[in-house]
Image (cartoon, helix red, strand yellow):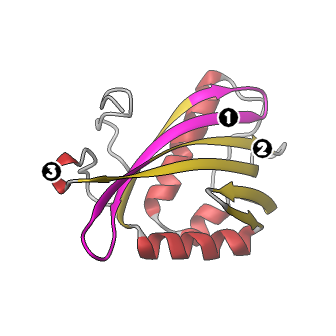
Amino acid sequence: MSTLAPPFTLQTATQKVRMAEDGWNSRDPERVSLVYTPDSRWRNRAEFITGRAEIVAFLTRKWAKELDYRLIKEIWAHSDDRIAVRFAYEWHDDSGNWFRSYGNENWEFDAQGLMQRRYACINDLLIKAADRKFHWPLGRRPDDHPGLTELGL
C-alpha cells in the first residue's frame, strides 16, 4: 500500500486525504487499519480506540450498522506532519432510515506517513432518501463526482 510521508505540501496532503477517502469507501477494515501505526490512538465521537486490532473491530461494527456507506473527505488545512479534514458521508440503518453524517478530523502522522493520531467529531442528520447527494456505486468515489464544496456541503 502506497504511503505519502511528511513533510506535507498542499499537493501531497490533498493526495493523502483522497487516499484516506478511497480506503474508507472500500469498507474493508483490515485494509483501512494498515495506514495507521500499530499503536495509533483515536477519538471517534465519544469512543477511544488504540491500535490496529481495535480499529478493525470498530470499523467492522461501524459498517455493519452504517449500510451503503459513501464518504467524501476534503482537506481543510495542513502542516508538516498534520492534516485537518472535513467530511460528510451518507448511509442508512437496517430500518431504511437515511442519514448524512458531517464531521471534522485532525490527523497526525509518523515519519513513515502512517497515521498515529486521529481525532474525529461527527454529527448525524436524518435525511429523506430523495435528499441524498452521494449516488455512485459502492466503492471509490468517481473522479468526476462533485466534492463537498461543489455539492454545497
C-alpha gap between disc 3 and disc 1: 33 Å
N-terminal of the two: label 3 or label 1? 1
Label 2 sits on a secondary structure element that is strand
- Residue at the top extreme, as displayed: 10
Mark count: 3
Q: Main secondary structure of the magenta part?
A: strand
* Residue type (three-letter) at the residue carrying disc 3: Ala
Q: Position of residue 100 (x, y in %)?
A: 36, 51
Q: Nearer the viewer, residue 110 or 129?
A: 129
Q: Quadrant of residue 51?
A: bottom right
Q: Nearer the viewer, residue 9 or 126?
A: 126
N-terminal of the two: label 2 or label 1? 1
What span is colored magenta in the figure? 76-101
N-terminal of the two: label 2 or label 3? 2
Q: Is residue 128 left or right of residue 138?
A: left
Above or below, 57 relative to 46: below
Q: Residue at x 28, y 48 (%)?
A: 134
Asked if residue 72 shows in the view, the reply is: no
Q: Residue at x 68, y 27 (%)?
A: 78
Residue located beneath label 2 in the image: 109
Is there a contact, CB below 8 Å, between mark 2 and mark 1? yes
| Badge number at residue 83 | 1
Instruction: Judge whether residue 22 is colored magenta.
Output: no
Residue located beneath label 3 in the image: 130
Q: Position of residue 148 (x, y in %)?
A: 38, 33
Instruction: Judge whether residue 84 is colored magenta.
Output: yes
Label 1 sits on a secondary structure element that is strand
C-alpha gap between disc 2 and disc 3: 39 Å
Q: Is residue 134 left or right of residue 39?
A: left
